[in-house]
Each structure stands twice: as C-alpha cells, then as structure tokens.
Image (tube, rainbow, N blue to C red):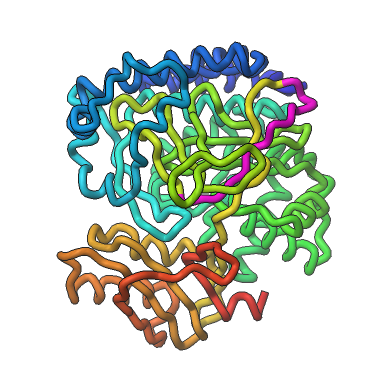
Amino acid sequence: MAGRPTNLYTALVSGVLFPLQERLKGHDTVAVRRSLEQSQWLERERLEPLRFARLRALLQHAAHHVPYYRGLFTRLKFAPSDMRTVGDIARLPFLAKADIRRNLEALKSDQARGLVRFNTGGSTGEPLIFYLGSERISHDVAAKWRATRWWGVDIGDPEIVVWGSPIELGAQDRLRAVRDALMRTQLLPAFEMSERKLDEFIACIRRRRPKMLFGYPSALAHIASQAERRGITMDDLGVKVAFVTSEKLYDEQRIRIETTFGCAVADGYGSREAGFIAHQCPAGAMHVTAEDIIVEIADESGRPVSTGCQGEIVVTHLATRDFPFIRYKTGDIGVYSDEACDCGRGLPLLKKVDGRTTDFVVAQDGTVMHGLALIYVVRDIPWVRQFKIIQESLERTRVLLVTDHGFSEKDIETIRKGIGKRLGSGVHIEVERIAEIPLESSGKFRYVVSHVATTRW
C-alpha cells in the first residue's frame, strides 16, 4: 500500500490538486518526489557519486555567487574542483548560528530571487533568522511527502495537525481555509492544552476520523492521556499513523499514542533551518534524506566520530544554493548506524537522535499550553543569542538571556508583557541577563522548563 492513494478523492488531491498548487508556487516538488522515490532504493555505493556531484556543484555556486563563501574559500585557498570525495567537505569550518546572525546578508546568493524569511527558536534555545529559496522548500516538501507515502497514506487523506508555529497559525485566512478543506487537513493549535481545549480536540478527531495525525509528540501524548482519563475510545477511528517531530520522542509517549489511537507512530527529525533530515520507515529504522542532506557526526573538537559513537549532528543541505547551509551545527546529538534496514532502502540510518525536550506551562487560571507559546515571545528579538524560560510557580517565571549589544530595557519590557499576556497579568516575570546558560545535569538543553506542569500533568 505504501505510496498508493487509498481512494479516488485522495488520488485527485495527490495527483492533480496538490501538484497544481506546487506548480503555481513555482515549486518542482512533484518531480523531486518522484526522483526521491527511485533513488531511495539505490545501494549506498551508487548513491554516493550522486551526492558528491551535487555537493561539488553547491560549493562551486557558493564560491561564485555567495559573498560569505567567496571570501571564506579565498582565505582558506579552498577550490571545490579539488574535491575528490564527500568527506573532503571536512576541510571547511562549521557554520554556527552566530555565523549566520553576523553574516545574514552575505549568505544570500546574488542570483537568489523570492527568498522567504524564517526564524526558529532552535533545539538549543538559540534564536535564528535565515532565508529559504524555492529550491530548498520544494525539496523539503518532497522529502516529507515521500516519507508520508511510506506508511500507506498520502496528501488528500484526512489529516489532523496539532501544531503551534505562528507561520502556520497566522495563515488561517480564507484562502488557506479553502486549501485545507480541499486537502482534507485540519490544524489544531497546540499552544493551549486546557481541559476544555483537550476535550474539543478529542471531539474534533473523533468527528473527522483522520487517516493520519501530525504534531509534537508531547501534544499528541497529552491528547491521548486526556482521552484515557475521559474513558473515550480513539482506536476505532481508522488512524493509520501518527507522524511526530520537532521534539524528542520518548518511549512512554510512543506507547501512549499507539495504544490510544491504535496506530503506528513514525518519528521524524529535522528543523526549519536544517531541513527534513531523517524519517522513520515502517520497519522501524530512521532513514536520512541522503539525496539532499549530508549528515556528519562530530565530536567536541569538530572531528568526525566513528559509526556508533555519539556526537553533534552537522548538516549540509544540497538544495540551498540561494542561502547555503554548509556544515551547519544543529546543536543536536546523534549516532550513525552501519546496519541495513529490512525495508530494503539504501538510505543511511541514524541510530539515535537527542537534544529536544519541551515542557508544557500552566497559566495562572489553570490553562495548560505548549511551552513553545512562550518561545515566540523571545526568539524574534534580534539581540537575544540564547535563552531559557523557567516556570518556577504559577506566580513566578524566570527568563535567562544571553544577549548581544543593542539589547535594551525596551526589549525586557516586551518579554515581560508578552509572557505575562500568556501566563497571566499577575505573574512576576524575572528577566536575567547572564554570560552563559548551563546545560541540564543530563547534558541536554531544555529551553522551556515548568516545575508547575511537571507536578500537575
């Protein structure tokens, strides 16, 4: 069933309406997806020359058309034409978030047209502004589409999306509503998780009877827990798969979602800036989108680690000529696997991904909301380099900041008002500027911590 529409309407959407939408946007998503569905079966030895050719072409473009890399390559005396293997990319330095912030305009290709501005809080609590071009967007959508079809569902099958990004939530105008109706997808805002909202979500899911769910694992697990508390059956709706991403998926969350909804859970790993990096197949393995993305695992000194060893995930996205991401440090921790997957795909595997945890927070009136509701208050302030939000109690929340020059009392007031608006006007918001934000004792970074939510839920 993988990759085959389940009914005529789904076939109409996936074969006609969605391709038409992508064509009108100037995206070549359909052609890219078809190519990916062929290349996924290549043996790794045959896939590597294709990756190398694309890598060298990206670097040659950057050398001629991207001011940041033109200067960098000149200083290093680096010539893409001298490369012989994909591994030669290690001759280049890493691209950190700080590098992007300092060189935002210089990272744009002089041939780029129609760049779209994005921002993200990032898994390390370090906000980032960056740009994507149509090539990159097409490839990421195609990669996600391919992975969706692995599970026997397709664009056009009824879908519930539990999400919280302002990019999606801010697009709920009439045109988007019509588009969602045609595509049979419905967006539920993940930020508010009150008893009333959870009951509404459960009723909506039961009424819609989706073939697939998509969202934060914590949010879907929270809905599942509420259904269990209410004694509401959810495993008779025909849900085939729950796609989860943007956070670390814990075993107890997977079990809760699978048990409540009677479906499989497919873990996905990626980010707005780094791309659609890896996705789990029905055989259980986490496949890297190797045609588009080169993933390196590096130790603290920047050296590649052996397969099976833990290190930082470093990404080079091959479809980023307009705004290159070359050896980008994600801040996440991962482990490569040298095993082959029973599904037969030749795509390399990630054995483990760590680095993303997000708590729920509780407003003074008892409303439970996703921790990301607070992140968006802080991350758009350009002078904030790193942050951590700690909800100590219903009456007190601390915001730890590492800032650049330019940060002012006005920005502090913006943070206090924004967070106070979400948590309650009576909450005392303490903003602390410090030199460095420490990691948790586990070595992970939690950019939202709620001592209230963890005791109540």
Per the image, is 346 magenta? no
Is 428 on the left-hand or right-hand side of 29? left
Taking 352 as reference, is 324 left or right? left
Residue at point 33% right, 16% down? Answer: 82
Up-down: is 172 above or below 435? above
- Asked if residue 214 can be seen in this view, the reply is no
Q: Which picture quadrant has residue 111? A: top left
Q: Number of callouts in the render?
A: 0
Q: Position of residue 63 (x, y in %)?
A: 24, 23
Relative to residue 202, is residue 417 depicted above or below? below
Q: In which quadrant of the rendered view does residue 171 lie?
A: top left
Q: Spot the residue most to the left.
A: 406
Q: Is residue 332 magenta?
A: yes
* Quarter containing the N terminus: top right
Residue displayed at 52% across by 55% down = 189
Residues rendered magenta in the picture? 331-344
Say which residue appears at 58% left-offset and 22% top-offset.
13
Nearest the camera: 412 or 9?
A: 412
Q: As rendered, which of 115 and 207 lies closer to the eye? A: 115
Q: Is residue 47 visible?
A: yes
Residue positioned 82% across, 53% down in the render: 259
The answer to which of 358 and 424 lies nearer the viewer is 358
Q: Position of residue 190 (x, y in %)?
A: 54, 57
Q: Position of residue 254 (x, y in %)?
A: 74, 52
Q: Quadrant of the C terminus?
A: bottom right
Q: Measured from the top left, where is residue 334 in percent x and y?
A: 59, 46
